[in-house]
Image: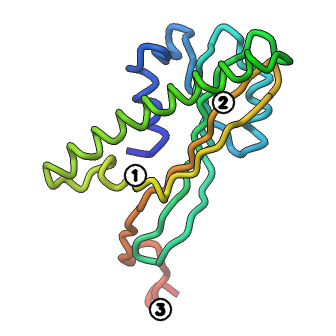
Amino acid sequence: MTFHSIVKQWCSIYKFMLHNSKTGNKRFYLTDSQMGVVDMAKSISNAFSPCVVMESTVEGSGNIRRPVRNYPVYFFVRADKMADGDDAAVAKEEAWMHARNFLTWLLVKHDEELNENRDGDFARIDLDAAYLDVQTVGPLENGWFGVMIQFEREEPLNLCIDENLYVTPDDC
């Protein structure tokens, strides 16, 4: 399962979101970059607060056998009055509450897989606090404020050569 599928799954069962694009309740959005997050804020209807936006970038580090990928996830809430400092603070606190609820759900799923000795999608997410980057975001267009959490996920590579992908001297 891809990391964005994990986030989307949470958005579809979390009572404050209940993401369902078939019914028009779209609360989970994917974008290509940090700039795309800003552009996305311009187009999200105010009715869909809170919501989650995730970058689908491919970035990371690590060694060749066990690289670590980064996944920025933004939890957004719209402030009633963008210029009002109190409204902005309330929106950021609500976004942080949703982010904490996601982290809690993720940790429970993670621990379940580890306790069952399964090397599943949740078990490979590094949930050590030293590997989470958290920061507030906003104001963005239309009064959106939020919290961004950047996750790091270990993604082991299967480094076997598929001979079908290469031309051999006999083929020439």
Residue at 68% over, 44% down: 32
Give the farthest residue toward the right: 83
Colour mapping used in the image? rainbow
Q: Residues within 10 Å of mark 1 (few under 14, many from 20)?
A: some
Q: Position of residue 82 (x, y in %)?
A: 82, 17
Spatial CA distance of label 1 from label 2 is 21 Å
Give the farthest residue toward the front: 86
Is residue 17 found left or right of 75 in the rendered image? left
> Above or below — where is 62 with respect to 138?
below
Q: Secondary structure at mark 3?
A: helix
Q: Are marks 1 and 2 in contact (CB under 8 Å)?
A: no
Between 142 and 167, the one lying in front of the other is 142
Between 145 and 90, the one lying in front of the other is 90
Q: Secondary structure at mark 2?
A: strand
Question: Disc 3 residue type?
Answer: Pro
Which-is-in-front pick, marks 1 and 3? 1
Q: Position of residue 95 (x, y in %)?
A: 59, 26
Spatial CA distance of label 3 from label 2 is 57 Å
Which residue position holds label 2? Answer: 146
Which residue position holds label 1? Answer: 127
Between 61 and 107, the one lying in front of the other is 107
Is residue 96 found left or right of 158 in the rendered image? right
Is residue 160 found left or right of 67 in the rendered image? left
Q: Residues within 10 Å of mark 3 (few under 14, many from 20)?
A: few
- Residue 169 - label: 3
Residue at 13% over, 49% down: 116
Task: Tell me the quarter of the picture where residue 105 sits.
Answer: top left
Question: Disc 1 residue type?
Answer: Leu
